[in-house]
Image (cartoon, rainbow, N blue to C red):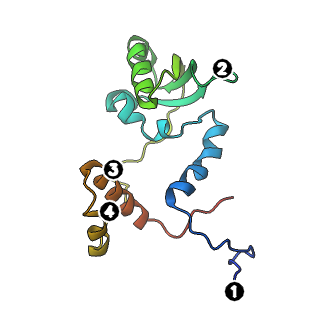
C-alpha cells in the first residue's frame, strides 16, 4: 500500500487535477513527431479531410515544414496500388482541404509514394458504446451548441471504454 501523499509508482503527487485536454495531446505528440507530424489530428481525421473514397486508398505519412517555417510544407501521402495516379489529378483539392483543416496555408505541395496502408479499424471490431448515465446526460444538457454537446457525449462514451489513466512508457 502506498504512503499518504505518494502514488502507486513511488512518485509524489502534485495534488492538482489535470483535464483530459491537457493529457491527451502529450500522449500522441511524441509518437507523431517521430514520423513528422506536428498536427496529429490530420492522421485521425484523414477520412473527414479527403473523404472516404480517397481515405480508403491513402493515408498521410509525413508533414515536412521548411526549417523555421510553419507554412509551405510538403505532405507525403502513402497510397495503394495505382491509386497514386488518381491522387495526382486531385492534388490541388487535397492541398485545399488540408489547408482548410489547418486554417491556414500550411501545405504547399503533396508527395505521393506507394506503400502498405496502415490497417483501418473495421466498424465490426469496435466495441459497443454504452449509453451515458443519467448524471452525465444531465451535466451535458445545458450545453447550447448541439455539435459541441454531441462531441462531448461521444468523448464521454469513448472514455467509458478505457481502463484507467493513460500509461506513458
- Dot 3 falls on a residue whose secondary structure is loop
Residue drawn 37% across and 28% down?
A: 50
Q: Are marks 4 and 1 in contact (CB under 8 Å)?
A: no
* Residue at mark 2: 66
* Relative vertical location of residue 109 with respect to residue 137 in this rendering, above or below: above
The quadrant in which the N terminus is found is bottom right
Identity of the residue drawn at 64% across and 38% down: 33
User: Local crowd at mark 1 within 10 Å, few (<14), some, or many (≥20)?
Assistant: few
**Which of the labelled discs sits on residue 128, or is there none?**
4
* Residue 159 spot, x, y in % from top left: 43, 63
- Distance of label 4 from label 2 (alpha carbons): 43 Å
Mark 3 or mark 2: name the one nearer the start of the chain: 2
Alpha carbon separation for disc pair 3 and 2:
38 Å
* C-alpha gap between disc 4 and disc 3: 10 Å
- In this orientation, which residue lies closer to the viewer: 57 or 162? 162
Foreground residue among 159 and 143: 143
Residue that badge 3 annotates: 123
Q: Give coordinates of residue 47: x percent, y percent.
A: 38, 35
**Local secondary structure at mark 1:** loop
As drawn, 136 above or below 94: below
> Dot 3, crowdedness within 10 Å: few (<14), some or many (≥20)?
few
Instruction: Kindly report the distance in space between the C-alpha atoms of the residues bearing marks 4 and 1.
Output: 38 Å
Distance from the alpha carbon under mark 2 to that under mark 1 = 50 Å
Q: Residue under circle 1? A: 4
Residue 66 seen anywhere in this rendered image of the structure: yes
Q: Nearer the viewer, residue 10 or 13?
A: 13
Number of labels in the image equals 4
Q: In front: mark 3 or mark 1? A: 1
Instruction: Decide which of tag 4 and tag 1 comes sooner along the chain.
Output: 1
* Contact flag, marks 4 and 2 (Cβ < 8 Å): no
Amino acid at each position: 500500500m502506498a504512503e499518504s501523499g505518494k502514488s502507486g509508482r513511488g512518485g509524489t503527487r502534485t495534488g492538482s487535477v489535470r483535464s483530459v485536454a491537457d493529457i491527451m495531446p502529450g500522449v500522441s505528440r511524441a509518437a507523431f513527431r517521430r514520423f513528422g507530424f506536428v498536427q496529429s489530428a490530420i492522421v485521425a481525421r484523414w477520412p473527414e479531410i479527403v473523404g472516404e473514397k480517397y481515405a480508403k486508398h491513402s493515408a498521410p505519412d509525413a508533414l515536412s515544414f521548411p526549417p523555421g517555417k510553419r507554412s509551405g510544407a510538403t505532405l507525403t501521402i502513402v497510397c495503394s496500388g495505382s491509386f497514386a495516379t488518381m491522387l495526382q489529378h486531385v492534388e490541388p483539392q487535397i492541398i485545399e482541404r488540408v489547408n482548410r483543416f489547418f486554417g491556414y496555408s500550411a501545405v504547399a505541395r503533396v508527395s505521393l509514394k506507394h506503400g502498405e496502408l496502415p490497417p483501418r479499424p473495421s466498424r465490426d471490431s469496435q466495441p459497443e458504446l454504452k449509453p451515458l448515465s443519467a448524471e452525465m446526460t444531465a451535466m451535458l444538457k445545458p450545453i447550447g451548441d448541439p455539435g459541441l454537446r454531441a462531441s462531448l457525449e461521444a468523448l464521454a462514451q469513448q472514455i467509458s471504454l478505457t481502463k484507467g489513466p493513460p500509461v506513458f512508457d
